[in-house]
Amino acid sequence: MTIPATPDLPTPPSPIKATIDFAADGVQHGFLRLPYSRDDSAWGSVMIPIAVIRRGEGPTALLIGGNHGDEYEGPIALYDLARNLRAEDVSGRVIIIPALNYPALAVGTRTSPIDRGNLNRSFPGRADGTFTEKIADYVTRYLLPRADIVLDFHSGGRTLEFLPYAAAHALDDKKQEDACFAAVAAFSAPYSMRMREIDPVGMLDTVAESMGKVFMTTELAGGGTATARSISIAKRGVRNVLRHAGICKGEIESRPTQWLDMPSDECFGFAFEDGLVEQLKDLGDPVRKGDVVALINPIKRTGGAPFEYRAAVDGIVAARHFPGLIKTGDCLAVIATVGT
């Protein structure tokens, strides 16, 4: 018996509805309403905050925070921007989503408390998929096509700590790559990174870049908190990007930046043992290939020799595991090479 082929079904529309008009001039504060039926609300919804500031024709910037819910500089900077940016300050349009993964931000977790989905590993998403996939689908099909430049804020969350840097990726399209790194330079963080991803599949970065967008991101400190310094970097940086894009007037507030690179997977160090982390190098410290950067001390009994993590490249410590305890497979440290 021949089994008939499954027909190709049309992609359903997103269940997410915006309460604002993307085409209207002025300042609008509203929500992306995603239906979520649950025990305590049969016809309930999750309301993702959004602001749109528009005046006339011009480029569109899509500014995202809270892609991961335990990373706070982006949400703080973008809630502030949404409060204070006026329509008369803008030529074009600014779409601000301070807490894209709103359920995760509300409880301070990296992944969604609804479905445990990692939003930044769920792109391009599915309109008929999981809760997290529905958010990713809406961004992919309804927001990214509107955008000319995309800034997605990140930091280390509860388990990593980074040097505060803005970043973009090496791309096959060198004109697009140059535009991305020009945005990174305009952000003017203390460090600027030519970034390598351990696993780019499912990331907003990858989808935005595949659509030809000018895309940049950040890693601003971490440890599941935000500092006065990291918040000021985020607030200044996002306004610099808007000025760079020609959406807002004013001079870019430039600060010195150190350019860094992640030229190979050897920049990433992972734990081969469980144990207690003893950092021998701090963030920003220079290291040579072969230097011991950290020890993992066994804790089940005394007398055991620690595992040594040695740098595989010359450079500086750009990121480190933040909690005192580590598990096998966790990222222990990142060594970045120093550029010009």
Image (tube, grey):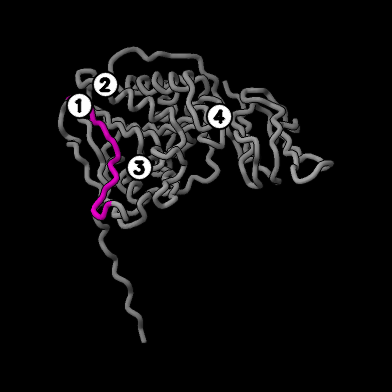
**Residue located beneath label 2 in the image:** 85
Q: Earlier in the sequence, mark 4 or mark 3?
A: 4
**Residue located beneath label 3 in the image:** 211
Q: Which mark is residue 162?
A: 4
Q: Earlier in the sequence, mark 1 or mark 3?
A: 1
Q: Alpha carbon of mark 1 to alpha carbon of mark 3: how far?
A: 27 Å
Q: Is residue 335 magenta?
A: no
Choose mark 1 or mark 3, whichever is in front.
Answer: 1
Horizontal side of 47 relative to 276 (left or right) equals left
Q: Earlier in the sequence, mark 2 or mark 4?
A: 2
Q: Disc 1 marks which amino acid?
A: Val
Q: Disc 4 marks which amino acid?
A: Phe
Labels 1 & 2 near each other (Cβ < 8 A): yes
Q: Residues within 10 Å of mark 3 (few under 14, many from 20)?
A: few
Span highlighted in magenta in the image: 41-55
Q: Is residue 51 visible?
A: yes
Horizontal side of 3 relative to 25 (left or right) equals right
